[in-house]
Image (spheres, helix red, strand yellow):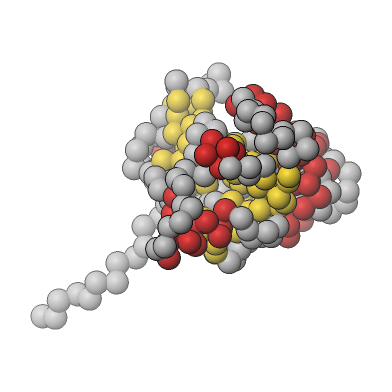
Amino acid sequence: MSMLFSWPVSVKGAADTAAEEAAAAFDSPSGTCLDWPNDAPQNMRRVPCSEPHTFEVTSNVEIGKDYPSSAPPPSDQGWQQIVTERCTEVGAKYVGGTLDPYGKYTVGALKPTAEQWKEGDRKLRCGLQRVTPSGQRLLTTTGTAAKQDQSNVHDPGTCFALVNKQEVGDPVDCSKSHSYEVVGNVDLSKVFPGPDYPSEDQQREKTVDLCPPVAAQYTGNKDLATLTLSLYSDTLKQESWAAGSRKVNCKVGALNPDGTLRPVVGSVRAQPASTTAKPSK
């Protein structure tokens, strides 16, 4: 899946610092990390890749040869095809040669607005981003994509909505109804050090041992069975393994006998011990 964004406002001629920074960010070179609030993309800014960011530029592609000055802009479907053809390969090279199709990163692009197109802008800003399961929101990432394991793992404490009683939705606060809660991650390279792909069944045989200590630390040794909750893990597809992904989520949810999920409300995270001083007698 790729997501395509156009520049949300015209900043040509603007004098304020925020607009100038946003304009500069929009024309950033490869290797630049960008961030913007979900509700205010016009506040795009450049940030160090070591900080949380929304988009990492992989290349700037000129499509003027195919779209001269008199040409109308591509349709939405046309833009998606251009992104697939012009940005996917450079994105793969950027992360070392292979893009994990099930991993944390997807190919995206920033395209000119209709006004910029009329003024002759034919540059497509290709990049990598992390998309929520719904495909409607972007998640921030930390660290450059060029040097990261592409495994689609999440921070402990991340909960995902339950949609239509069977589909996993976007991240939500754990106090709300959700499908499962990530309690930690495990690295399968520790038990499968070689390059050969272990089947998903073989992976599960190992995560049965790897995930319980992670869950115990996260939950404060809660007895999940008494809470009618189950501990289970993700697995890696062969394409992910070939791309170098080695980490999976350990997660807690309420599994029905038929494998469907029941909604859960509240976190299983252990509450920190109180540090409030006792009143003196």
**Residue in view at x 44 percent, y 34 percent:** 161
Quarter occupied by residue 3? top right
Quarter occupied by residue 123? top right
Task: Please tell me whether residue 136 is drawn above or below residue 193 in the rendered image.
Answer: above
Relative to residue 196, is residue 12 drawn left or right?
Answer: left
Task: Please tell me whether residue 223 is drawn above or below residue 135 in the rendered image.
Answer: below
Relative to residue 32, is residue 171 drawn left or right?
Answer: left
**Residue in view at x 56 percent, y 58 percent:** 25
Locate residue 238, reporting x and y percent.
80, 36
Task: Please tell me whether residue 253 is drawn above or below residue 222 in the rendered image.
Answer: above
Q: Is residue 142 visible?
A: no
The quadrant of the rendering that contains the N terminus is top right
Locate residue 218, reporting x and y percent.
49, 55
**Residue in view at x 57 percent, y 53 percent:** 26
Q: Is residue 10 visible?
A: yes
Instruction: Identify which residue, 27 or 218, lies in the foreground.
Output: 27
